[in-house]
Amino acid sequence: MGAVLLFALVLLAVFFPWDWLRGPLNRYVSEQSGRKFEITRKLDVKLGLTTRVFADGIEFANPDWARDPYLVKAESAEFEIKLWPLLRGQVALPLISLQQPVFGLQIQPDGRRTWALGRDTADAGTVPVIDALVVDRGTLNYLAEAQGADIKTEFAIAGANPGTNAASGQGDMPLNYKARGTWKKEAFAAEGRTGSVLQLSDTQSQPFPIEVKASAGRTTLQAKGSIGNLAALDNLDASFDLKGQTLADLYKILGVVLPDTRVYAVRGHLSKQGRVWNVSGIQGRLGQSDLAGQLVYDKSAPVALLSGKLASKSLDFEDLGPLVGVPTDASGKTTKTVATSASSSAPKQVQVAGKVLPTAELDFERLKTMNADVWFKAAEVKNAKGLPLERIDSHIKLNDGVLQLDPLDLGVAGGKLTGLIRIDANARPVKMQARLDARTLQLARLFPRIEATKGSLGRLNGRIDLAGSGNSISKVLGSSSGTMALLMGKGEISAVLMEFMGLDGGEIIQFFMAGDKNITLRCAAAAFDVKQGLMSSRAILLDTADTVINGNGQISLVDETLNLVLYPEPKDKSILSLRSPLRVTGTFARPSATPDKAALVKRGGFALLLGALNPLLALAATVETGPGKDADCEGVLATASPVKPPEKPAAATPTPGKK
């Protein structure tokens, strides 16, 4: 009797007219989810601990606040559902297979999501657990206002016959897709291939293959690889090619703070473990510069950290222009105004007419969104537009809105400029500080555009200690305070240059007729106190075998004007020597020099400056004095100090009885 009853129950389960339950099931799901659910044509069920449900025609509505009427609408659906988790209120679906589905996914800024079942659509616990999803010939609409995303994706299995999931000729990536819309409010498009079975569980059995070509705004990406955990977008392993107008655009698209650059093309290998992204084998170009290295982007901490090393064998200085606010056009020529695309995330680069110091406003607000610890090295710097910059080596540290280049080591004019630059983006306006030491800069290479300096020999040393505030280089220097000093020991300098400075007409004619000759430089020094952008001279001195030049005056970094007076005293006899001061006026862009015939020539060059050279004493030890009594800069500076250096201890007197 028991066997007969069991057999009858089996027959009932097999031949039960499940479609009779379609109405009650529609009402039950609608009541539990708070939205309309309907199997429109036919229902069939195969019972088991994992029950298989077949629905011919399915409609599952979205909440009232959603734009799209349906979360999912499909011609047919087949899904597996585990019964025991269902009794505990959990929806576990090992498999969902949909034909011609239309999805409407939407997430609100307050966290509500259309795919969260139950009346509280912000509750993550009510989201069904889906292990695998098979789809064919469908559409997915995704709307996320907070991310500026509105994307429509169409997909289909290539070579599949209607009503089947079999594919031909597509290997392990038979599902083709195309997407259009906006991402981060930028125009977005993507297309590619993936596997036909989307494994969405955390226990994904094998890597999911993916191939994509995408563009967002002015940025394009091609990538091919696999994802080990599709549900969490984890264990990513892919090669990529990334191109765009400026790396700064990636901040808007991905939230990664990178400098404003010129057109770039970068390739490499991308991997992801947990919340850590690793970009290795980077090879590419930024403008005319090459780039290589590795970066790690760690989002596990409250503030993301970008770390790594980047190197360039040859860096075009024009590619750094946007980084410091110097606008350049596509041809590499410096321009007064560059209008950027409306889609650009970088600030508009505008250079005020007549200004030499960069005036473009820089976006420092982004410095507070991420931390960084990156080493950058450029073995060679080209096309420096008259600047003697030859190489770059720096440690870039960004922590809680404070950016430091420390240490900073620049190759300049055959020597180097070392120290640190600090930018505090938390201050209003932004505060900047620079402490730099110049060592052994070659005079002949310091001003490469000035022909008259090319025959000059000698090495310069200097120190810059300035602090200012503002959102452009011009404003920072215009508000800066501190000191600047420059010192040069024994060397040689172009006679033509010296005679121009000394206004010795007879000597100019002589050297033009007989050719340029170098004359010995005994000492050169300049020191300025800087207060609120006004540079006031403490000392200006240049002493050669032919001429002594003393000077004083001011230089304004606020309005870029010059007001200096140089007092030349030629040591040789010349019938055309003007013996009058030289006034240097005008602006940085249009300087002028004219003789002041009314002023009296001041003599006693060194005596006028001994009390003013104290700021240069810190540089005295770096002077290359060379042999000979004429190279006495170090002695002059020591004499100028109010605190005399300690004398060398006298030779010890021999003690009687000791040898």
Image (cartoon, grey):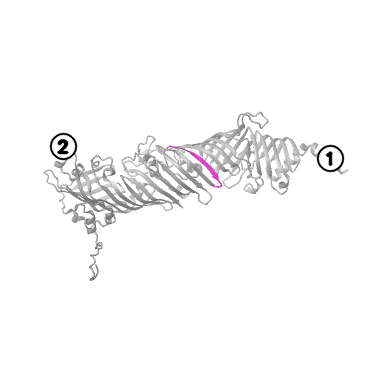
Where disc 1 sits, the SS reads: helix
> Most prominent secondary structure in the magenta stretch?
strand
10 Å crowding of disc 1: few (<14), some (14-19), many (20+): few
- Percent of width and height locating residue 173: 60, 34
- Percent of width and height locating residue 343: 47, 38
Give the answer, above or below, for where 98 lies relative to 256: above
Amino acid beneath label 2: Met
Q: Residue at x 77, y 38 (%)?
A: 18
Asked whether 252 or 108 is in front, the reply is 252
* Residue 178 in view (yes/no): no
In the image, is 453 to the left or to the right of 107?
left
In the image, is 292 to the left or to the right of 524?
right
Q: State the residue position of label 2.
A: 513
Q: State the residue position of label 1.
A: 7
Q: Which mark is residue 603?
A: none
Where disc 2 sits, the SS reads: helix
Magenta span has 232?
A: no
Q: Where are the magenta residues, as a range?
A: 262-275
Q: Earlier in the sequence, mark 1 or mark 2?
A: 1
Amino acid beneath label 1: Phe
- Percent of width and height locating residue 222: 51, 35
Give the answer, above or below, for where 87 lies relative to 650: above
- Percent of width and height locating residue 370: 48, 49
Magenta span has 272?
A: yes
What is the distance, in whole Å, between disc 1 and disc 2 at their CAs? 123 Å
Q: Quadrant of the N terminus?
A: top right
* Residue 491 in view (yes/no): yes
Res. 53 image quadrant: top right
